[in-house]
Amino acid sequence: MKNAILVHGCASKEEFLSEQFPSSSNSHWFPWLQKQLAIRGIQAQTPEMPAPYEPRYEKWKRVMDRFEVTKGTFLVGHSCGAGFLLRWLGENKKEGEKLALVAPYLDEMRKRQDFLDFTVDATLQDRVGQIIVVYSTDDTVEGVKQSVDMICAALPKAKLHTFSNKGHFTLEDMEKEKFPELLKLLV
């Protein structure tokens, strides 16, 4: 049976604690994508990762370890969530059907301390059926372009999909909570 796990990125403490914004797992295009996958018979989960404003790898790993990840699993990560999935998959030698990395962020400057302190595992491309990297040329988050380049160099089988008008793929940048282009790449 196919399943999907969608991992959100990091948020500022102000955004996370504000009543004005939904939780990280319920923001941007995540609820829409989760429902679209469910409609297509793919059970999708969007876990709320602990303290996304000061992420700790071991805490996020404990959450992720609760899920069954098999050859039929679709994994989607946004920003820091994409970096987390790369680290988690590499360290745990997990398999999957598809891995979508949306505006992936690897934090080369270590602004998030050791959260993303790892080397991309090149053997990942032999365990995951398809790796999709999604990038927008107007992304203003420092380090995303460098992260995309690093991922594509480490995983040459990854397929890069470039947009020019999606920013960091947040609701503010996309002006809608739907992301049909990603859904098309997944199913």
Image: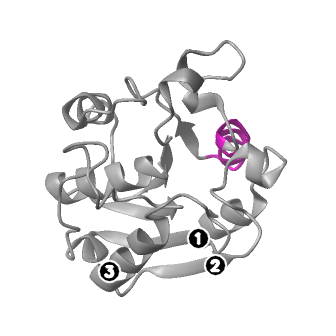
Q: Is residue 147 magenta?
A: no
The kind of residue on which mark 1 rests is Tyr
Q: Which residue is mark 3?
A: 155
The kind of residue on which mark 3 rests is Leu
Label the magenta part by its dominant secondary structure.
helix
C-alpha gap between disc 3 and disc 2 = 16 Å
Please tell me which residue is depicted at 47% across the width and 26% down the height of the picture.
48
- Looking at the image, tell me whether mark 1 or mark 3 is earlier in sequence order: 1
Q: Which label lies toward us, 3 or 2?
A: 2
C-alpha gap between disc 2 and disc 1 = 5 Å
Please tell me which residue is depicted at 77% across the width and 69% down the height of the picture.
165
Image side of residue 93 versus residue 97, left or right: left
Q: Which residue is mark 2?
A: 162
- Looking at the image, tell me whether mark 2 or mark 1 is earlier in sequence order: 1
Percent position (x, y) of residue 170? 68, 48
Residues tagged 2 and 1 counted as in contact (Cβ below 8 A): yes
Magenta-highlighted residues: 30-41
